[in-house]
Image: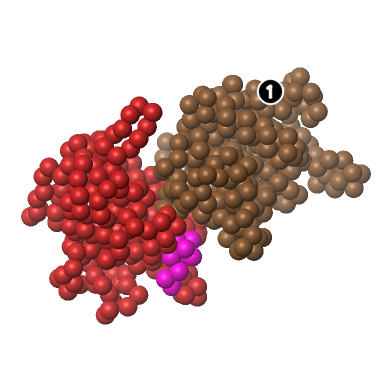
């Protein structure tokens, strides 16, 4: 296996080694999220308190509609809490406007989706370069080399110049993970990353997350698969918009 | 009116002669396009020798059942997949001879593509999603990009949502956003693959109304759909079955 070196500067990395940094990377205080629609109001999150240490691999489980995706979305700033505080890497993201959140997210968070969300008109490597263009964390001259390195890391180097529609679902998700790593984010979030994959591809993708966790990445993953969830260090169970259970695995 | 001779035998020499004589040239010209997929289960021929021309200002709808070859046709025209044989000319350029990279350049210059599931980037705002293709084409200066993106959002009637994220929009609004993004670099052709496939019927009608408006403003559209009500709105309707064109009907008969 490749030596995993994800950081711009491994010596000074904020989360390069577990235990080195004792601060909480993610801190949610009394987070409530209410949606208004013509059918009435719906409260998806009912006062969530959550802390995630740097370097942790946390799985989030719960039935459909329990608030898992909403929880991930308020942490990435894709959704805004109705009340409460969301602090990620010392940034109070609930206080930023949408454009600032987009800039912050591009640099700080790698977001992985169930349906990959690669741009179909760009090749694998171009999808990663795009994320680097937006993140602006690496000088333009270093980007192609890093993009290819990341594809190698996820086992997709030989498919760098292929369009997403010529790749299998599992391969597309590997490319999406490489894209999420593009700007060396402090946090990776994944919403049902194996939900659209057969069991063999799901294992390949999950194993990739395990390797990243071992390399010191902080990972928050929503999954409906309890067996996979149990392989994370810590599992949080949501029901009806509340954290109802929390346990350390192994 | 139904076209009888579906297989064009136009040679390159005839094409050039026609251009020289001032005859209208098709924006998209498919000549005997065959696409065969090989898999462990054997080979499947998705397109069996398609001849099809799309002219400037047309609203061409390709319809047919699931598995008839519609999406394969879109992938050929946009260069997102390669044909097994045959020729694909886009705006006078031989797309079938191009590498993935060169095809991407041609696509970026001439086409906007709209997909069934929108394919927006969820981590960028509505405005940023529209500006994204402009970054690639470098046709507009940075300060023009924002202004142009806002104009496009106004055109598709979602300017008020410019600073939101795509997930905060309804399905119909997300598809309007995808259409605005497709028009980012002012392409000659819009290609849409089942653009109403993820929408309820009222929302679908509104999205098709938008396409009709764009055609009135001079845009050329190639739209693929399985929905007969959507198909009826085209200026010409081509029906695919088992990878072959089985009928071609024009309203007004201009290009039939």
- Which residue, given by chain and number where applicable, does mark 1 sit on? B247
Applied colour scheme: by chain
Hey, which quadrant is residue A7 in on the image? bottom left
Number of numbered discs overlaid on the protein picture: 1
Residue toward you, B128 or A38 = A38
What x and y, as percent, mark residue B140?
A: 65, 60
Q: Colour of chain A?
A: red
Q: Colour of chain B?
A: brown
Q: Chain of mark 1?
A: B
Q: Which residues are magenta?
A: A129-138
What x and y, as percent, mark residue A158?
A: 43, 61
B43 versus A162 height, above or below:
above
Q: Secondary structure at mark 1?
A: strand
Which residue is at the far bottom? A11
Residue depicted at 35% across the width and 67% down the height = A184
Q: Is residue A165 found left or right of B79 in the rendered image?
A: left
Q: Is residue B104 found left or right of A131 in the rendered image?
A: right
Residue toward you, B49 or A215 = A215
Q: Is residue B19 magenta?
A: no
Q: Main secondary structure of the magenta part?
A: helix
What x and y, as percent, mark residue B135?
A: 58, 60
Q: Is residue A133 magenta?
A: yes
Residue toward you, A117 or B175 = B175
């Amino acid at each position: 296996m490749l030596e995993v070196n994800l950081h711009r500067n491994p010596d000074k990395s904020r989360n390069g080694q577990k235990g080195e940094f004792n601060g909480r990377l993610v801190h949610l205080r009394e987070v409530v999220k209410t949606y208004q629609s013509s059918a009435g109001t719906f409260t998806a999150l009912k006062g969530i308190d959550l802390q995630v240490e740097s370097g942790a691999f946390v799985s989030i489980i719960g039935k459909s509609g329990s608030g898992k995706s909403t929880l991930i979305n308020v942490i990435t700033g894709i959704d805004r809490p109705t009340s409460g505080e969301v602090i990620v890497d010392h940034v109070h993201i609930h206080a930023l406007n949408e454009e600032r959140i987009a800039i912050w997210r591009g640099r700080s968070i790698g977001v992985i989706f169930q349906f990959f969300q690669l741009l179909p008109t760009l090749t694998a490597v171009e999808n990663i370069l795009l994320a680097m263009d937006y993140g602006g964390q690496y000088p333009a001259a270093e980007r192609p080399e890093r993009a290819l390195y990341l594809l190698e890391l996820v086992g997709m180097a030989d498919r760098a110049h292929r369009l997403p529609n010529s790749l299998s679902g599992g391969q597309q998700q590997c490319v999406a993970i490489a894209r999420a790593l593009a700007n060396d984010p402090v946090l990776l979030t994944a919403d049902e990353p194996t939900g659209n994959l057969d069991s063999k591809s799901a294992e390949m993708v999950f194993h990739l997350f395990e390797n990243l966790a071992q390399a010191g990445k902080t990972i928050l993953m929503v999954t409906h698969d309890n067996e996979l969830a149990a392989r994370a260090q810590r599992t949080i169970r949501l029901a009806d918009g509340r954290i109802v259970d929390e346990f350390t695995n192994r | 009116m139904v076209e009888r001779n579906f297989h064009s035998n136009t040679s390159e020499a005839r094409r050039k002669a026609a251009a020289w004589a001032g005859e209208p040239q098709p924006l998209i010209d498919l000549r005997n396009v065959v696409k065969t997929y090989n898999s462990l289960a054997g080979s499947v021929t998705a397109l069996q020798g398609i001849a099809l021309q799309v002219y400037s200002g047309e609203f061409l709808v390709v319809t047919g059942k699931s598995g008839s070859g519609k999406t394969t046709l879109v992938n050929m025209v946009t260069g997102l997949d390669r044909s097994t044989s045959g020729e694909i000319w886009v705006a006078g350029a031989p797309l079938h001879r191009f590498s993935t990279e060169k095809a991407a350049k041609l696509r970026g210059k001439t086409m906007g593509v709209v997909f069934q599931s929108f394919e927006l980037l969820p981590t960028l705002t509505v405005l940023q999603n529209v500006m994204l293709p402009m970054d690639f084409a470098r046709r507009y200066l940075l300060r023009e990009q924002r202004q142009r993106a806002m104009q496009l959002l106004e055109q598709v009637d979602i300017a008020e949502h410019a600073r939101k994220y795509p997930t905060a929009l309804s399905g119909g609004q997300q598809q309007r956003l995808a259409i605005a993004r497709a028009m980012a670099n002012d392409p000659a052709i819009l290609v849409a693959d089942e653009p109403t496939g993820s929408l309820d019927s009222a929302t679908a009608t509104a999205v098709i109304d938008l396409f009709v408006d764009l055609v009135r403003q001079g845009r050329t559209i190639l739209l693929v759909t399985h929905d007969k009500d959507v198909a009826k709105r085209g200026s010409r309707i081509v029906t695919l079955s088992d990878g072959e064109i089985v009928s071609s009907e024009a309203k007004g008969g201009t290009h039939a």
